[in-house]
Amino acid sequence: MNRIPGGVWVPICSPCDSTGRFLPAEFEKAADILLQEPGVEGLYVCGGTGEGLSMRNAERMEAYGIAVDRARRRGKKVLAHIGAHVMRDALELAEYAAGVGADGISTVPLPGVEHPGQMAYYRAVCKAAALPVVLYYTPGAAQTLPQVLETMTIPGVAGIKSSSNDFFFTMRVMAEKPDGTLVYSGKDEYLAAAVIEGANGGIGMWGCVFPRAYADIYHFAKAGDYRRAFALQTTLNRLCCIAFRRGLLQSFSCICGHIGRWEQVFRPPAPQCDAAFRKAFLAEAAPLIDKLMAE
């Protein structure tokens, strides 16, 4: 089985129309924009930012194929997120992603399933894909630290994306993980600190709109250039404070429009960015957005 590298993987959006229908041509444009950044290792497809759980399997399969095609043209890689509401759908997606040439698989836990069932699920995913698997620990996950560490011992599991709001939890995962496994920081607000503490990479939603700045935080921190790493981290965190206060999804959508990217990336009934929201948000956030874009 091939190994997957650390580094920055960008969770690509899955642009849609007003009904939530996936727009493959817009997705292809998004992939090309993100893959041109030299500091980006590859794409993380149909994760939380990409709304995989809100898409139909056929749409996700189409996204995998496009992502692999565009990534190969630039010598880059693809992690296909296959987490689903039911195990059957996830395994179907895993097999398909492997078949079209994805470099690895990622998945959130199955909803409502206790730890023994999660272990069985992860083993099945590893078998179905026969690719390196990156587990995805989400803020709402009920798994304890010993359970998370046990999942990382499953043959075929290459690492984990830790998006815990508790930085010390992520630090403990990094300190106690099985030898040879990777930890990706999934919480953008502490990316620089996570890399300094030993994270092998980052997979975070703000990389989708600020891929260069996000990658620079990682690379500066890894190189020991803490001044520049934390200068960018501080700017990003100030923007995050505004976004969380005003509404994360609307703020993210507003930024997408402001920088000339995608009209809609979150499916109904997710809250959308209207003209009034855009005006108020940009009045406060535009200088930070422009600073991150100028990086």
Image (cartoon, rainbow, N blue to C red):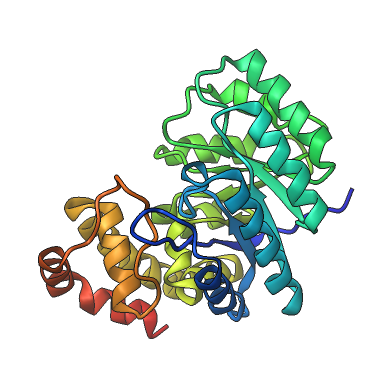
Q: Which of the 4 image quadrants contains residue 118? A: top right
Q: Which of the 4 image quadrants contains residue 121? A: top right
- Across and down, in percent, residue 8 comes to 60, 63
Q: Residue at (17%, 54%) from the top-left corner?
A: 246
Task: Report the side of 70 relative to 197 (left or right).
Answer: right
Count all numbered tags in the image, as a single digit: 0
Q: Residue at (51%, 52%) from the top-left corner?
A: 194
- Across and down, in percent, residue 18 comes to 33, 59
Q: Residue at (61%, 41%) from the top-left corner?
A: 174
Task: Report the side of 240 relative to 246 (left or right).
Answer: right
Q: Residue at (60%, 57%) from the top-left corner?
A: 44
180 above or below 194?
Answer: above
Any part of residue 280 in sight: yes
- Across and down, in percent, residue 247 comes to 22, 52
Task: Report the side of 62 relative to 249 (left or right).
Answer: right
- Across and down, in percent, residue 100 comes to 79, 57
55 above or below 126?
Answer: below
288 above or below 266?
Answer: below
Q: Quadrant of the C terminus?
A: bottom left
**Residue at the farthest bottom position:** 294
Work out whether residue 286 or residue 237 is closer to the camera in this orientation and state it. 286
Work out whether residue 122 or residue 184 is closer to the camera in this orientation and state it. 122
Any part of residue 225 in sight: no
